[in-house]
Image (cartoon, rainbow, N blue to C red):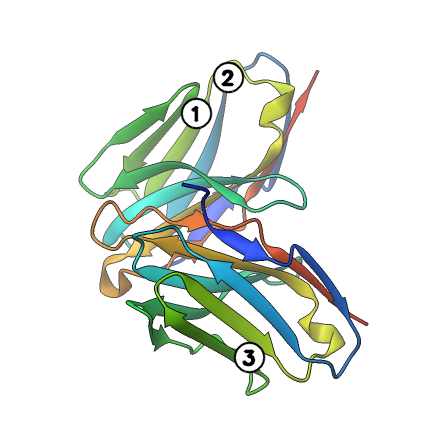
Amino acid sequence: DAGVIQSPRHEVTEMGQEVTLRCKPISGHNSLFWYRQTMMRGLELLIYFNNNVPIDDSGMPEDRFSAKMPNASFSTLKIQPSEPRDSAVYFCASYRQGEGAEAFFGQGTRLTVV
Amino acid sequence: KQEVTQIPAALSVPEGENLVLNCSFTDSAIYNLQWFRQDPGKGLTSLLLIQSSQREQTSGRLNASLDKSSGRSTLYIAASQPGDSATYLCAVRPMDSNYQLIWGAGTKLIIKP
C-alpha cells in the first residue's frame, strides 16, 4: 500500500482565501484523523472520523474550519477564510480500528498563509 | 486526565552508542502505546506499537518496552547511526477514549558521526 496520501505537500495562500487539503487514507482503514502541528502547540487533533462519520470535532478551531469524508477513501479539510495564524503543518492519519489500531500518518501539508 | 511526558527533550550522543528514550504516562488504563519518529519537515513514521497486554516489541535495532504499572515505556536504540537522528514521539491511546492519541512532546535525538 502507498500509505496515507496527502495533497498538496505545500500550500502558500493569501489571507482570506479558501484552502482545501486532501487526504486518501490507507485502503481498509475505517478511522481517520486530521491533526495540526505547530512549534508552539505540538500536535493537535482537529477531527476524528469513524466509518466516514465525524465522531469528534471538538478540536476544530472555529467555524472557518470544516472537514468532510464523503467516502472511505477520501477526506478534505477546508479553511475559509484562511488567516496567517492557520499557518502550520496539517497531517492526516488513518488506522483500522480493532486490529492493533496502529496509526499511520501522511507526509503532511505545510500551509503558509501570508 | 492522561498526560504523557518525554524526557529528555533533546539528546546528543556519538555514533555507535546504545541509547534509551523515555516516555511516561499518568494513567495506566491504556489501549496501546505507539512510538513514532519524525524527520525535519516530514511526516510521522510509526516505529513500534505495543498493546496493553504486551511487555515489549522489537524491530531491527529498536526495542520498545512497556510497564503499565509504573506508567513507563522505553525505546532502546542499539548501535546508533547518524541516520537515527530525528525527533522521537510516543503516543498513548487511553482506554476511556480509544481513538484519541495523547502525545508526548518528543525527544530530539542527534547522533554525531
Report the disc number at residue B76.
Answer: 1
Whether residue A25 is visible, yes or no, is yes
Q: How crowded is mark 3: few (under 14 residues within 10 Å), some or many (20 or more)?
A: few
> Which corner quadrant holds the N terminus of chain B?
bottom left
Of all chains, the one bearing label 3 is: A
Viewed as shown, does residue A108 lie left or right of A18? left
Which of the pair A20/A39 is nearer the observer? Answer: A20
Q: How far, Cα to Cα, is label 1 from label 2?
A: 7 Å
Nearer mark to the viewer, of 1 and 3: 3
Q: Is mark 1 on a helix, strand or loop?
A: strand
Q: Label 1, label 3: how many angstroms apart (C-alpha)?
A: 37 Å
* Residue A84 % position (x, y): 75, 74
Q: Which of A58 and A52 is in front in this view?
A: A52
Quadrant of the rendering where the C terminus of chain B is positioned: top right
* Helix, strand or loop for disc 3: loop
Q: Residue at x 38, y 49 (%)?
A: A103
Q: Position of residue B74 (x, y in %)?
A: 40, 33
Q: Which amino acid does label 3 sit on?
A: Pro
Residue A76 located left or right of residue A18? left
Q: Residue A61 carries which label?
A: 3
Marked residue chain, label 2: B
Residue B18 badge: 2
Q: Position of residue B41 (x, y in %)?
A: 67, 46
User: Where A103 falls versus B55 (above or below)?
Assistant: below
Q: Do labels 1 and 2 share a chain?
A: yes
Q: How far apart are marks 2 and 3 (CA)?
A: 42 Å
A82 above or below B30? below
